[in-house]
């Protein structure tokens, strides 16, 4: 998942017409986005780098990766940050920690703590993340154009 500050979902490209849930967004191989105030969350079980906006490494964006045994946090911009966990142990810790990283002292579970970190950056709760945001899958612009052209 990623948190991109001060941007709208339209900066990521065309969105599918149908809303999906957070639970669908995080298991989909397609990239999905949700607007939260002036910021955007990005989710994909596949490759987040399929979102052109993230390939630009926007200033202040925070990217997290979580699997069964490891977790990673990266920030983009002038003050880059990288923090990696492997089997619960910090194996890389570069750059100045974000203020919200105190969550790692408060919540032991890596999955929960990393999601909580993103939520704190956006000023929402994990419940908001899971149940109150409108998630949309990114759709290539040409597909939307063809659909409009042929009335689909």
Image: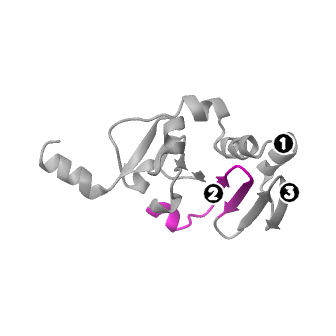
Earlier along the polypeptide chain: callout 2 or callout 1?
2
| Residue drawn at (70%, 49%) of the image | 68
Q: Is residue 118 left or right of residue 144?
A: right
Q: Is residue 143 left or right of residue 80?
A: left
Nearer the observer: mark 2 or 3; the answer is: 3
Circle 3 packing at 10 Å, graded few (<14), some (14-19), many (20+), is few
Earlier along the polypeptide chain: callout 3 or callout 1?
3
Question: Which quadrant of the view contains residue 140?
Answer: bottom left
Residue identifier under label 2: 63
| Residue drawn at (49%, 34%) of the image | 21
Q: Residue pushed farthest left?
A: 150
Q: Please tell me whether mark 1 sits on a helix, a strand or a loop.
A: loop
Residue identifier under label 3: 89
Q: Which residues are magenta?
A: 52-75
Q: Which mark is residue 108?
A: 1
Q: Please tell me whether mark 2 sits on a helix, a strand or a loop.
A: strand
**Between residues 42 and 38, which one lies in front from this camera angle?**
42
Residue 72 position in % (x across, y down): 71, 58
Q: Residue pushed farthest bottom?
A: 78
43 versus 55 height, above or below: above
| Residue drawn at (21%, 53%) of the image | 145
Q: Is residue 14 left or right of residue 11?
A: left
């Amino acid at each position: 998942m990623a948190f991109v500050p001060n941007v709208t979902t339209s900066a990521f490209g065309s969105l599918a017409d149908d809303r999906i849930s957070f639970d669908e967004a995080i298991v989909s191989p397609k990239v999905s986005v949700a607007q939260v105030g002036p910021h955007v969350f990005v989710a994909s079980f596949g490759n987040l780098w399929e979102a052109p906006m993230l390939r630009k490494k926007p200033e202040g964006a925070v990217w997290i990766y979580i699997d069964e045994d490891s977790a990673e946090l990266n920030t983009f911009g002038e003050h880059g940050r990288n923090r990696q966990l492997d089997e619960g142990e910090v194996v890389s810790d570069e750059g100045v920690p974000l203020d919200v990283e105190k969550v790692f002292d408060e919540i032991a579970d890596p999955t929960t703590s990393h999601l909580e970190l993103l939520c704190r950056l956006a000023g929402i709760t994990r419940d908001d993340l899971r149940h109150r945001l409108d998630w949309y899958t990114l759709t290539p612009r040409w597909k939307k154009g063809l659909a409009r052209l042929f009335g689909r």
